[in-house]
Image (cartoon, rainbow, N blue to C red):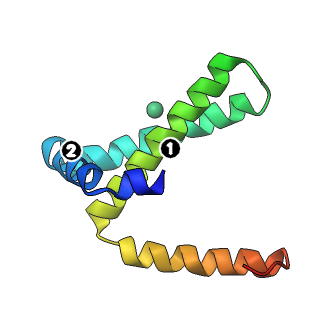
Amino acid sequence: MNELLASNKTQELLKDTIKYYGIGNQCQKAIEELSELIRALSRVHYSSEPSVIENFNEEMADVYIMLEQLKLIFRNQEDVKKQLERKLERLTKRINKEV
Ligand SMILES: [Mg+2]
């Protein structure tokens, strides 16, 4: 999945999307998609209905797409990567496992 989001084709599409809709609209869209995922997660937690699971999967995909756009908007790919590494290292220590 990371490869799909990081591919040149996807990155170009996302840059074009930001240009087309504008930064402000895409930030607002990110807020909407994040809130949709929160709602989908709270539903899937209590249901095994296929439509609920499908909606949850869809909202996760939407959020992945928006997070990728936020990295392009804020040009913080490297900083986010560093935070990811730091947090994964911290998590590894917490659960006492070697990576
Ligand atoms: Mg959505």
Disc 1 element: helix
Disc 2 element: helix
* Residue 90 higher or lower than 19, as above or below: below
Residue drawn at x 29%, y 46% is 26
Tell me which label, 2 or 1, sits earlier in the chain: 2
Out of 69 and 50, give the one closest to the viewer.
Answer: 50
Q: In which quarter of the image is the C terminus?
A: bottom right
Callout 1 crowding tier (Cα within 10 Å): few <14, some 14–19, many ≥20: some
* Residue 65 higher or lower than 83, as above or below: above
Out of 20 and 51, give the one closest to the viewer.
Answer: 51
In the image, residue 97 lies at what x, y percent? 82, 78
Give the amino acid type for the residue marked by disc 1 in the picture: Leu
In the image, residue 40 lies at what x, y percent? 62, 32
- Give the residue number, with chain letter if any, for mark 1: 34
In the image, residue 86 lies at what x, y percent? 60, 81
Callout 2 crowding tier (Cα within 10 Å): few <14, some 14–19, many ≥20: some
Residue drawn at x 28%, y 62% is 72
* Marks 2, 1: nearer the viewer: 2
Give the amino acid type for the residue marked by disc 2 in the picture: Thr
* Residue 73 higher or lower than 90, as above or below: above
Q: Is residue 64 visible?
A: yes
Horizontal side of 37 relative to 47 (left or right) equals: left
Residue 17 - label: 2
Out of 9 and 19, give the one closest to the viewer.
Answer: 9
Q: Do the residues labelled 2 and 1 touch (CB within 8 Å)?
A: no
Horizontal side of 53 relative to 1 (left or right) equals: right
Confirm if mark 2 falls within 8 A of ligand 1. Answer: no
